[in-house]
């Protein structure tokens, strides 16, 4: 892209040359137009690749979030069970203390 821009700048500078014939000016204009179109095509191609990569990354992130939610839900269920066990154990200890 940098080379294309440099070539376009060179052409723009040369277009002001009063020694150019009409054919040479026309050739420079065509070349400039070709370079502009080439640059647009490259930008579009890069944008398409970037969009595809972002979509892919976004899908991977969604998958990771789903996995994290599953893990979090599982851990939440485990902590609920442990809370229940702690309460029951506390009640058993209280009962044992009263019996003693």
Image: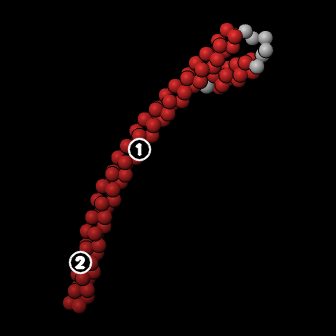
Left or right: residue 88 compared with residue 50: left
Q: Secondary structure at mark 1?
A: helix
| Separation of marks 2 and 1 at Cα, in angstroms | 45 Å
Q: Pick whichever, 46 or 17, lies toward us.
A: 17
Residue 73, above or below 93: above
Q: Pick whichever, 36 or 47, lies toward us.
A: 36
Task: Report the residue at 54% width, 27% height from top.
Answer: 40
Q: Is residue 3 visible?
A: no
Task: Report the residue at 46% width, 32% height from top.
Answer: 48
User: For the residues carrying marks 2 and 1, which lies nearer the camera in this image?
Assistant: 1
Q: Secondary structure at mark 2?
A: helix
Task: Report the residue at 40% width, 39% height from top.
Answer: 56
Q: Position of residue 57 (x, y in %)?
A: 42, 41
Q: Residues within 10 Å of mark 2 (few under 14, many from 20)?
A: few
- The residue singled out by tag 1 in the image is 58
Quarter of image, res 91: bottom left
- The residue singled out by tag 2 in the image is 88
Q: Position of residue 15 (x, y in %)?
A: 73, 18
């Amino acid at each position: 892209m940098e080379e294309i821009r440099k070539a376009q700048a060179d052409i723009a500078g040369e277009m002001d040359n009063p020694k150019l014939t009409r054919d040479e000016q026309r050739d420079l204009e065509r070349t400039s137009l070709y370079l502009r179109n080439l640059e647009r095509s490259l930008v579009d191609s890069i944008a398409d690749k970037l969009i595809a990569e972002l979509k892919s990354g976004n899908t991977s992130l969604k998958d990771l979030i789903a996995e994290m939610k599953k893990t979090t839900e599982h851990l939440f269920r485990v902590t609920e069970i442990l809370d229940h066990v702690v309460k029951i154990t506390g009640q058993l200890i209280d009962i044992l203390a009263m019996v003693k």
